[in-house]
Amino acid sequence: MKEIDKSSGSPYACGLNDAYQKRMSFPHKWPKGSGIGQPIVNLTVEEQDEYLLGFNQQTKFKDWE
């Protein structure tokens, strides 16, 4: 099995961040790093799986109060 890219902007990192911010699941990646350039939403099945893995593994969530 391939090692998962957990760097800033990767599908996995985006999943973690979306879950932490309590946003809905919306698989994407930022090829130049989180928030730099344009997000990519046309992901491969493997990238979608990595996003969902990050989204589902997040255990800490932002307290908006």
Image (cartoon, helix red, strand yellow):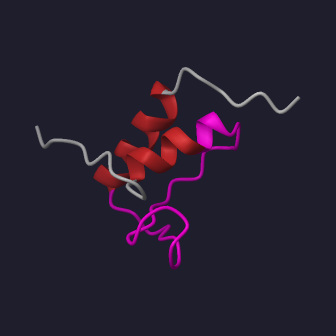
User: Residue at coordinates 51% horizontally, 79% vertically from top-left?
Assistant: 37
Residue furthest bottom as drawn? 37
Residue 5 is covered by the magenta coloring: no
Residue furthest top as drawn? 59
Residue 23 is covered by the magenta coloring: yes
Screen quadrant of the N terminus? top left
Screen quadrant of the C terminus? top right
Q: For the magenta stretch, what is the residue range?
A: 18-44
Overall secondary structure of the magenta section: loop
Along the line of sight, which residue is nearer the eye, 43 or 15? 15
Rendering quarter of residue 12: top left
Q: How many marks?
A: 0
User: Residue at coordinates 36% horizontally, 43% vertically from top-left?
Assistant: 49
Q: Position of residue 25 (x, y in %)?
A: 61, 44
For residue 63, above or below residue 11:
above
Q: Position of residue 30 (x, y in %)?
A: 45, 66
Q: Position of residue 16 (x, y in %)?
A: 50, 39
Is 31 displayed left or right of 21 in the figure?
left
Along the line of sight, which residue is nearer the eye, 10 or 24? 10
Rendering quarter of residue 9: bottom left
For residue 63, above or below residue 47:
above
User: Residue at coordinates 33% horizontally, 61% vertically from top-left?
Assistant: 44
Residue furthest left as drawn? 1
Rendering quarter of residue 4: top left
User: Residue at coordinates 39% horizontally, 63% vertically from top-left?
Assistant: 43
Residue furthest right as drawn? 65
Q: Position of residue 54 (x, y in %)?
A: 43, 36
For residue 26, above or below residue 32:
above
Is 59 displayed left or right of 44 in the figure?
right
